[in-house]
Amino acid sequence: MKPHELLPAAGSNRPSRRVGRGIGGKGGKTAGRGTKGQKARGNVPANFEGGQMPLHMRIPKLKGFNNPFRVEYQAVNLNVLDGTGLDSITPADLHARGLIHKGALVKVLAGGEISRAVTVRAHGFSTAAEEAIVAAGGTVEVLPLPWGDRRPPAKGNQFTNR
C-alpha cells in the first residue's frame, strides 16, 4: 500500500467546510481566497494568463499534414486498356484518347478484365493488374519516374496551397 492509496474509513468523511459565512467559524471574511486581486473577486478561467495570449490560442491548429513530396498517380483500370483497341499502350496514347491528364503518372489497377495480349507501359502497376496482363499473354513495362531515383519535387508551400 502506498500513501496515495490511503482512504478514510467508510462513513468517516467529514462534510466540506462552508466558507464565507461570517466570523463564527473558520473561513470568514476572505473565505480562504487571500486578500484583493482578481482571483479573490471573481471567477477566473483555469486557462487565463493575465491578458497574455493563452497557450491554447498560441499553438497552431492545422488539422492533419499535407506531404509536399507525395507522388500522385492517375489510376487506369484494365477494362479501360482493353477498350482502347491498341496492342501497345503508353501514357501518351491514353492522353491522346482523353483518358488521363497531360503529364500524369499512370498506375494500372485491376478493375475489370483484359481479354487480349497487350504491351502496357506505365509508371506503376498493382500486383493483380500485372498478373492479369501477363496471364492474358501481354507484357508489362514500368516507366521510370520523371525525377529519377531522387524524391519528387515539393508541391509548393504546404500552408498556402490548400
Image (cartoon, rainbow, N blue to C red):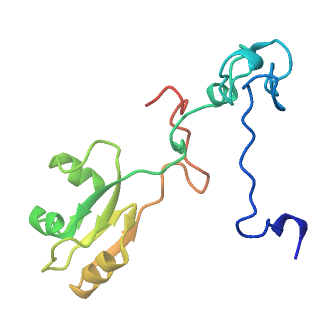
Q: Looking at the picture, how far across and down is residue 6, in whole percent? A: 83, 68
Q: Looking at the picture, how far across and down is residue 110, in whole percent? A: 25, 73
Q: Is residue 54 left or right of residue 94?
A: right
Along the line of sight, the residue nearer the viewer: 50 or 150: 50
Along the line of sight, the residue nearer the viewer: 118 or 38: 38
Along the line of sight, the residue nearer the viewer: 91 or 132: 132
Vertical side of 84 occupied by 60: above or below: above
Quadrant the N terminus occupies? bottom right
Return the residue found at the far front. Answer: 24
Q: Looking at the picture, how far across and down is residue 58, in whole percent? A: 66, 25
Vertical side of 131 occupied by 28: above or below: above
Along the line of sight, the residue nearer the viewer: 57 or 7: 7
- Image point 61% across, 31% down: which residue? 60
Q: Looking at the picture, how far across and down is residue 148, in whole percent? A: 56, 54
- Residue 80, quarter of the rendered image: bottom left
- Residue 9, quarter of the rendered image: bottom right
Vertical side of 153 occupied by 26: above or below: above
- Residue 18, quarter of the rendered image: top right
Q: Is residue 122 left or right of residue 54?
A: left
Quadrant the C terminus occupies? top left
